[in-house]
């Protein structure tokens, strides 16, 4: 049951005893009022100061996030600021949080508004530069080289800006086939950083984009502040796609120039760095082809001269001469070998004839020619045997008598044994032998 207006409010609401809206609003207001005054830094995106009113309404936005708050201040405070407060200006506000019960809205009641001067902005940028440099975000070794001919180029720039025209026209005149994906964003003011971060994330996730270009024309320090924003610098440093910074003119140097993989002095310079010049590349190819042709011709001429020198050598001028010399050498060696073999053969023949003569002189034929004979008889088995004793034959035995010039066959008529002798055979017996 809902508590009535006059009843006591429970310490903790429940489904049975909920708090009314006014109680919740009052408790929120109590908590907010306990905060006390705070110093807040941001960028003015809207000023509403109607004539005849005593209160001005401002919108204070965080330059690095999509967060804003309403600020109220007296018209006298707004008029007394020198220079006058304008939209896009960076300010530091001393204000007290205020919760309006009637509408349930939170706002800041400004007690003091200070414009952030150029000196302060530059000092903050310098402190941030030292911080990022100490973290290694400016190191040359982490910067990536751009592809020679990117498949696709992402361009983040202002809508219908001169920077967009410079990049597109110059790049397409250098390489007509280049393909751009253009995302137009705010390039100054409170909306610049969130929109650039969104565009950078989208292009970095596209696999067809191999280079991302952030381009903007020149401007004041305040205009170029988004490109020195810490969140943007860290996003560029962590991007997986190489990023080219083409912000302002040559003297301008936002922190993005130090973090990007390539810094270009102007958007026109960026168009010359991201794609090659087709005319220059064609001329370079033609020059390389000419150099290759000259080098090949030089090599062929050198090899031809080498071949001529080799052909002029005696061994190639008359290739049959060495063969003829070798043939003559072989013929001479064959003749020497033939003569040596004939000499050896003659010597061996002479030696053989001498041995044959000695053998003939010592052999049985020579003895038989001197008058001796060999008497043979047939044994009981029918074989011929040399007769050595009268006891080996009997009357009527057939004999075979071999003399120097033939064979005589005879028959034994008588067998007479010789008497014993001590002085050798008689002359007649020796003649018979």
Image (cartoon, helix red, strand yellow):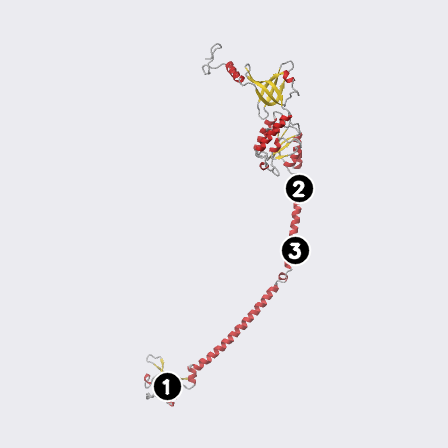
Which quadrant holds residue 49? top right
**C-alpha gap between disc 2 and disc 3:** 34 Å
Q: Which residue is mark 2?
A: 282
Q: Nearer the viewer, residue 71 or 409?
A: 71
* Dot 2: element: helix
The mark that comes first in sequence, 2 or 3, is 2
Q: Nearer the viewer, residue 84 or 159?
A: 84
Q: Is residue 85 left or right of residue 14?
A: right
Q: Which residue is mark 3?
A: 305
Q: Nearer the viewer, mark 2 or mark 3?
A: 3
* Dot 1: element: strand
Image point 54% across, 73% down: which residue?
339
**C-alpha gap between disc 1 and disc 3:** 103 Å
Residue 65, horizontal then vertical, whole percent: 57, 25
**Which quadrant holds the N terminus?**
top left
Q: Nearer the viewer, mark 1 or mark 3?
A: 3
Q: Nearer the viewer, residue 218 or 174?
A: 218
Query: Crowdedness of circle 3 by 10 Å Cα count: few (<14), some, many (20+)?
Result: few
Query: Crowdedness of circle 1 by 10 Å Cα count: few (<14), some, many (20+)?
Result: some
> Answer yes or no: do the residues labelled 1 and 3 have beta carbons within 8 Å?
no
> Answer yes or no: do the residues labelled 2 and 3 have beta carbons within 8 Å?
no
The mark that comes first in sequence, 2 or 1, is 2
**Which quadrant holds the C terminus?**
bottom left
Q: Which residue is mark 1?
A: 410
Image point 46% across, 79% down: which residue?
356
């Amino acid at each position: 049951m809902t508590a009535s207006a006059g009843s006591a409010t429970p310490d903790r609401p429940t489904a049975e005893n909920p708090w009314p809206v006014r109680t919740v609003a009052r408790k929120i207001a109590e908590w907010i009022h306990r905060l006390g005054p705070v110093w807040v830094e941001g960028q003015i995106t809207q000023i509403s100061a109607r004539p005849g009113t005593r209160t001005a309404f401002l919108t204070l936005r965080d330059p690095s996030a999509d967060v804003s708050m309403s600020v109220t201040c007296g018209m006298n405070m707004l008029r007394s600021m020198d220079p006058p407060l304008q939209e896009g200006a960076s300010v530091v506000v001393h204000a007290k949080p205020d919760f309006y019960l009637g509408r349930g809205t939170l706002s800041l009641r400004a007690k003091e508004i200070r414009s952030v001067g150029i000196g302060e902005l530059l000092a903050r940028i310098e402190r941030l530069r030292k911080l990022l440099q100490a973290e290694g975000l400016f190191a040359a070794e982490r910067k990536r080289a751009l592809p020679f001919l990117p498949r696709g180029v992402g361009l983040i720039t202002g809508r219908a800006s001169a920077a967009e025209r410079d990049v597109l026209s110059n790049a397409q005149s250098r390489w007509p086939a280049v393909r751009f994906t253009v995302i137009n964003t705010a390039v100054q003011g409170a909306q610049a950083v969130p929109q650039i971060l969104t565009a950078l994330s989208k292009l970095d996730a596209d696999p067809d984009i191999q280079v991302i270009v952030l381009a903007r024309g020149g401007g004041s320090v305040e205009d170029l502040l988004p490109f020195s924003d810490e969140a943007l610098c860290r996003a560029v440093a962590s991007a997986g796609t190489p990023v080219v910074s083409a912000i302002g003119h040559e003297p301008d140097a936002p922190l993005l120039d130090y973090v990007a993989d390539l810094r270009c002095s102007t958007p026109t310079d960026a168009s010359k760095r991201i794609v090659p010049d087709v005319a220059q590349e064609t001329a370079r190819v033609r020059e390389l082809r000419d150099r290759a042709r000259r080098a090949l011709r030089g090599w062929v001429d050198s090899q031809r001269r080498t071949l001529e020198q080799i052909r002029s050598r005696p061994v190639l001028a008359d290739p049959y001469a060495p063969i003829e010399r070798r043939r003559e050498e072989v013929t001479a060696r064959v003749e020497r070998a033939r003569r040596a073999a004939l000499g050896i053969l003659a010597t061996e023949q002479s030696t053989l004839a001498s041995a044959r003569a000695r053998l003939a002189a010592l052999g049985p034929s020579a003895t038989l020619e001197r008058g001796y004979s060999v008497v043979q008889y047939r044994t009981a088995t029918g074989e011929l045997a040399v007769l050595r004793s009268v006891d080996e034959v009997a009357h009527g035995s057939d004999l075979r008598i071999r003399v120097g010039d033939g064979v005589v066959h005879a028959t034994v008529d008588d067998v007479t044994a010789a008497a014993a002798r001590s002085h050798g055979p008689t002359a007649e017996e020796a003649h018979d032998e």
